[in-house]
Image (cartoon, grey):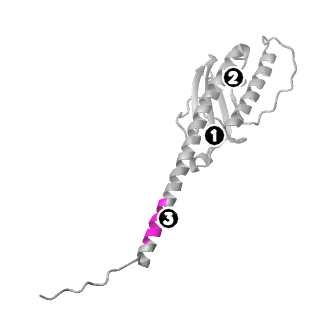
Amino acid sequence: MKKIKNQKKQRGFALLEVMVAALVLTIGGVAYMRLQQIGLQSGFNNAARTEGAALINAFTEQLRSNVTLIREGTAADKTGSFLADDVTAPTDTVDCDSSTLTCAKIMFNLHRYLTSQQMSQITPKKNSRLCYIESGTDRGLMRLTFQWRDNSKAGQTINLTGACPAFNAYIDQNNSVTMYVQL
């Protein structure tokens, strides 16, 4: 019987195998970085949503403590918006007992200032807005919406200088938290 000679075994990698391995590792690395970016963005949005809900609750309680503005103020007094860190500190030094509408408006401006300072802790300067609008029935029903911008494509399209959402507008929008409250 004839013996078969051992064929020479291939040793090492071929250039093609190295290039395929490098391509697979590169695609995997890029996918991993994108996954981390999505995770960070989701974490920021969840934190902003949670902080926004707490901010709306705090602002609502400040409005509830201002009974004179709620009862005697016009709808224009209870409708508006402001950006983070964009409200100047009130300089009025009126000694009042909060039973007059003038004093109530001064207190409301102070609440707006404090809330805008809190908003600047949630997002960078002027990258978030709080809108408040009364229902128009003069019964103290209000819609408060906290909106913010982020680095995502959807987050960059948020218009913080345009009109606030209407009282009955669609509630589930990108980068926003909306609450309806009874004062």
Q: Nearer the viewer, residue 5 or 121?
A: 5
Q: Nearer the viewer, mark 3 or mark 2?
A: 3
Q: Which residue is mark 1?
A: 148
Task: Tell me where residue 26 appears, x and y as whole percent.
Answer: 49, 64
- Give the extent of the magenta segment: 20-28
Q: Residues within 10 Å of mark 3 (few under 14, many from 20)?
A: few
Task: Tell me where residue 102 appears, x and y as whole percent.
Answer: 81, 17
Sequence-earlier tag: 1 or 3: 3
Q: Residue at x 58, y 50 (%)?
A: 153
Task: Tell me where residue 97 appears, x and y as whole percent.
Answer: 81, 11
Res 166 seen here: no
Sequence-earlier tag: 3 or 2: 3
Q: Nearer the viewer, residue 145 or 3?
A: 3
For residue 14, above or below residue 33: below
Task: Tell me where residue 10 appears, x and y as whole percent.
Answer: 35, 80
Q: Secondary structure at mark 1?
A: strand
Q: Nearer the viewer, residue 145 or 2?
A: 2
Sequence-earlier tag: 1 or 2: 2
Instruction: Check disc 3 and give the amino acid type.
Output: Thr
Residue 36 shows which numbered tag? none
Q: CA distance from mark 1 to mark 3?
A: 34 Å
Q: Which residue is mark 3?
A: 26
Q: Residue furthest left?
A: 1
> Which quarter of the rendering shows the N terminus?
bottom left
Q: CA distance from mark 3 to mark 2?
A: 59 Å
For residue 144, above or below residue 128: above
Q: Residue at x 86, y 23 (%)?
A: 92
Q: Residue at x 56, y 38 (%)?
A: 46
